[in-house]
Image (tube, grey):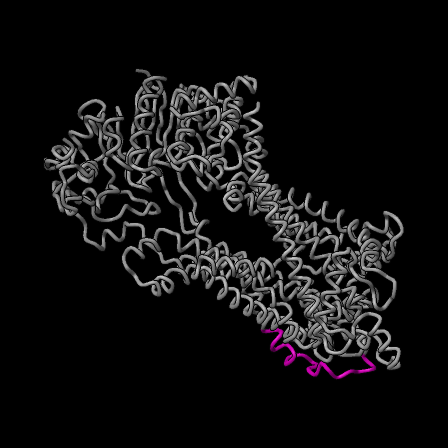
Amino acid sequence: MQTHLHRLFESWMPMFKYILKRILYMALVMWIVTSITFFLLHAIPGDPITAMVQDLPEETRQAYLVSYGFDQPVGKQYLMYLKQLFSGNLGQSLRYPGRKVADIVANYSPVSALVGGIALAVGVLLGLGCGVLAALKRDRWPDRAVMLLALLGTTIPTFVIASVLQYALTVTWPVFPTTGYNGARYLVLPVICMCVGPLATYARYMRSSMLDVVNQDYILTAEAKGLSERRIITHHMLRNALLPCVTMICVSVAGIFSGSFIVESIFSLPGLGRYFISAISDRDYFVVLGLNVVLTGIYVCSILVSDILLMLLDPRIRTVGEEAA
Amino acid sequence: MGELLNVKNLSVTFSAYNGEVKAVRGVSFTVYEGETLAMVGESGCGKSVTAKAILRLLERSSATVSSNSVVEFEGKNLLTLSGKELNQIRGNAIGMVFQDAMASLNPTMTIGNQIIETIRSHKKLGKREASKRACELLELVELPEPQALLRRYPHELSGGQRQRVMIAMALSCDPKLLIADEPTTALDVTIQAQILELLQRLQKRLAMSVLLITHDLGIVAGVADGVQVMYGGSLIEKGTAQDIFCSPKHPYTAALLTAIPRRSMERRSDLYALPGTPPDLRLALDCCPFAARCKYAMPICKKQMPEETGETPGHSCRCWLQHPMAPRVALNGGEAGG
Amino acid sequence: MEFSPNDFVIEGVSSTEEQERLASRPVTYARDAWSRFRKNKIAVAAAILLLLLVLLVVFGPLVSTYPVAERANARARNLAPSAEHWFGTDSMGRDLFTRTCIGGRASIAIGLTGAVIVIVLGSLYGGLAALLGGRADDLMMRVVDIFSSVPNLLVIILVSVVIDSKSIAAMIFAMTITGWCPTARIVRSQMLQISRSEYVTAARLMDISPVKIVLRHLIPNTMSVILVDTTFRIPGFIFNEAFLSYVGLGVQPPQTSWGSLAAAAQGMFQFYPWQLLFPAGAIALTMLAFTLLGDGLRDALDPRLRR
């Protein structure tokens, strides 16, 4: 028993080292991205106050500049901003004083995450299922049907699907409320619109991944061993075919927090995607900067999660990870 | 010796984007109980396809096995069995080993689980008993530390070890027939010899039959009881190892024997290579497939495929030189093989 | 069958021509790929569709009854499609067929230029990393890692906000600034795979100069990957352009694109659905054509599918 535990410890230690290394690397990436964004936004000609409101009296403008520290040199502003970030403050809106980025995220991202999360779950599950079905029934009608739908799903822009659905199911045939956010019925159409994309993408991806696996020699071995068709599919094909999808799924999960601007604006949902774009057109740069930091952070975390998941699922990567550590 | 496997008139066609490839063209042969039969031929001659067709492993690909083909194993035609009945034979009464063990093992499953699932799909054994059996099998194929090996993944082993695992897996239900499809091609020469010796020992110990498929006539010599030579999708010569090595009847067999490198060769120029390339299997080939490359080709060879003839029992050949009207020639294989 | 003694005279090995007739012909990679592509009806149809779309977009305004797209006509606002106005008119009375063609020029031009820039940059970067190897390769790939750690759409939005110029060139710049990263990765890994392959090792052993190896082996074998990548990137750019224009960060009036036409029509969809459906249909058709073409090219060029 002792030796077994020891063995376990020995085999997992390099993995922890590897993960630690990845986290440090992640922090580095976050710092670089934040810095680049910061300097990019400060490279915009003119000061942020003038960019928002043109006809302020000079004295008021100066007072604002001083109160936000914009009269300081950029280097000092940068240090101040980093200090602020480290204390956990993501900054606040210039346009609506007192509205903090953290509050914006807390208020707007749950709607995005709810709609996006349901849509992604439905899209991924159905998409993977359709992809598997298409691969197993290759060149027969289920395959043709799935591929045709997936093709349409990837080629028709979301705003067309959203507009047509909205028109058909709220105006011509009023089953669902047109816009707004007031209960589950308001979510049905946005969810349908948002799951079309992932459904189509995952169906296509999973199909080709499955076809890759079906042609592998180990499937031939599994057949030669006399395993049942069902066991070959569940134990040999699915696991190996799902591996390449793991990274993609994690990135998609990160994407749901930023929301979908198009769907949120067509259905007037109070989500983060819509807020982000409106902050851009408002030239509310500190909100843009703060949201960018948050969204990049979520994205980088999702990549880390996908790396760890892959390491747990794929023994070959586990060894590579050990070598890297 | 009873007949174990009887292949009759097996034909396999692949439909490719550029035409139909007739990979196997009416092949018939018999594997007897307890014998090792070697099937030899150049790559692309259809020997691997024949092996896979026996266990119906071509069903996922674009291949069609012609309807008048028969693969009889212990009296049952494998080609007409239901999926369930077939699965009771695959991995159980017939085991199979493939060329590339790395690609043939599932990379995300431990060695142990891959052997255990084979055992448990054929025998009513608990996990613990199956695991014990897996351990014994790894010992049987002479792998060290079998207990630890069960928890390893294929990429953590060496090429030779992986092939031993493949053999252990194929033997897990004490098969009556082991089909080994180029089991040593992907290995180093020294490892090749070890694996062949292992196969030979196991064949004696477990009293099973082995169908050994290889492109290398050289490795067959000490191992096989019977040898059959394949060319262009057809079997062109069958006989005992003695017959084939000492008195080949088909010019192609003779040429293959000449091509085996021997220790007496000192210079590179002594290596013999058969000129020309194998025939395009998309063509109908109603003539002898070897005619274009044959030193002894006659006009008749390009008109018609010769029948299978044999004057001594057990040694037969498809060549016009065997015809009474053909001139007698001394094939150089005799002295070359000695 | 009767045999004549003449049939049994030994002639020996056939002539080379005779042997060649029977031997399996080695086919060159390009010719093989081309013959496979031609047999793929869907891909050929996609290529023809694409050609038609390009012709329509370029020459459409010439055959249109209302070639001058910019002329507003107060009496002809929001007309439904008719013999006179094939796609109807927009809220300012402009002929939508002509507008769609002209918008298509911008959309397709952005798609093509974007893809070409990304592919050229990515291939050079990835190829250089693969050739240099070692620490340089490590460092170069780290940079790619960092660039790809920011969500793509965020970069595009941020950069277009920062450059604050609404020209098409600015938009292409925003879309390509990190867009070359995936291509660099693909090209690098393909190059490394080839340079580790046995035929390159053989060429090295035969003392063939590195320049010749790069020219004869690495580049031709990477071209197929690059070509397939290009066809899949173009629709991505067209889609992103549509999104940006839709959001208001893209092509600005008086210029137009499919995305901005769709955005303008969005609010009035319930009343004049064709104003959205025609430009959107054009986007969908172009995407469809490029996707199917890419699928066909990949199947034709991927040697793994050769059987």
Above or below, comparing residue B167 to residue C119 in the picture: above
Question: How far from the left and from the top, in percent, is residue B216?
Answer: 27, 36
Is C245 left, or right, of B193 in this rendering? right
Kindly identify the residue that appears in the image at 42 percent across and 30 percent down. Answer: B166
Question: How far from the left and from the top, in percent, is residue C62?
Answer: 63, 81
Is B93 left, or right, of B246 in this rendering? right
Residue nearest the viewer, comparing A272 with B45 = A272
Is A68 left, or right, of B326 in this rendering? right
Question: How far from the left and from the top, in percent, is residue A235?
Answer: 57, 33
Can I make out residue A141 in this image? Answer: no
User: Magenta region: which residues?
Assistant: C55-76
Question: How far from the left and from the top, in percent, is residue B258?
Answer: 17, 39
Residue nearest the viewer, comparing B137 with B22 = B137
Kindly identify the residue that appears in the image at 63 percent across and 71 percent down. Answer: C172
Quadrant containing the N terminus of chain B in the rendered view: top left
Does the magenta segment cover residue C60? yes
Quarter of the rendering containing residue A234: top right
Residue nearest the viewer, comparing C263 with C272 = C263
Does the magenta segment cover residue B187? no
Q: Residue furthest top?
A: B1
Residue nearest the viewer, comparing C22 with C169 = C169
